[in-house]
Image (cartoon, rainbow, N blue to C red):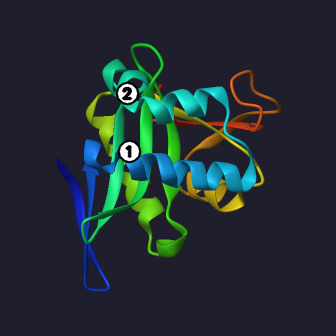
Amino acid sequence: MDQLEANSNMSKVEVITYDKKFLPEFVSLNQQWIEHYFKLEQMDIQQLNDPEGTILNHGGEIFFVVEDGKAVGTCAMVAHGDNAYELAKMAVSPDVRGKGYGNLLMEVAIGWARSKGIDGIMLLSNTVLEPAIALYIKYGFQVISLGTHPDYARCNIQMALYLKDD
């Protein structure tokens, strides 16, 4: 279950795979950031109401950053076919931002994808989320399209990270 552990200011921090006891945090952390900038959309509601049925049962995974026993960050890897995955539902509690937990989530999610032999990871976002876009670029994601997206009204940028050489 443990993916990565670190000590942060004497706190015990670990990144773990899905644990149902942290489902309320998966929902609240994502609702918080989405509703701060945008509004919940149908796909959000489906994934937040049934992450097991919409993400886990289709070969995806959900990760949590757990600090001193409390989930303070999360992200999901959502399967789209045999070898296509989307990094989605990434959120870190405002109370712990700046501690590098976004980096931990990125490292674990990308490592998970590499361990599965996945060719690449895509993500959908919005350019107003400048810190998130900067994080994605830091980890090698490239812009593949700008403009509206058919699945999410809020998305105006699609990015991808290619994990295998041509």
Task: Examine the rendered structure and indicate whether residue 13 appears above or below residue 36.
Answer: below
Q: Nearer the viewer, mark 1 or mark 2?
A: 1
Specify few, some or many for label 2: CA neighbours under 10 Å numbering under 14, 14-19, or 20 or more.
Answer: some
Q: Residue at x 68, y 50 (%)?
A: 35
Residue 107: horizontal and vertical position, in percent? 38, 53
Q: Is residue 52 left or right of residue 143?
A: left
What whole-number distance in Å separates the C-alpha atoms at marks 1 and 2? Answer: 11 Å
Front residue of 83/41: it is 41
Residue 113: horizontal and vertical position, in percent? 35, 35
The residue at the far right in this view is 147
Say what amino acid the circle numbered 2 marks. Ile
Front residue of 151/27: it is 27
Residue linked to disc 1: 109
Residue linked to disc 2: 118
Task: Examine the rendered structure and indicate whether residue 87 appears above or below residue 134.
Answer: above
Query: Can I make out residue 124 in this image?
Result: yes
Q: Residue 135 occupies which quadrant of the picture?
A: bottom right
Q: Residue at x 78, y 38 (%)?
A: 156
Say what amino acid the circle numbered 1 marks. Ala
Q: Secondary structure at mark 1?
A: helix
Q: Residue at x 58, y 48 (%)?
A: 31
Residue 114: horizontal and vertical position, in percent? 33, 36
Mark 1 or 2, nearer chain start: 1
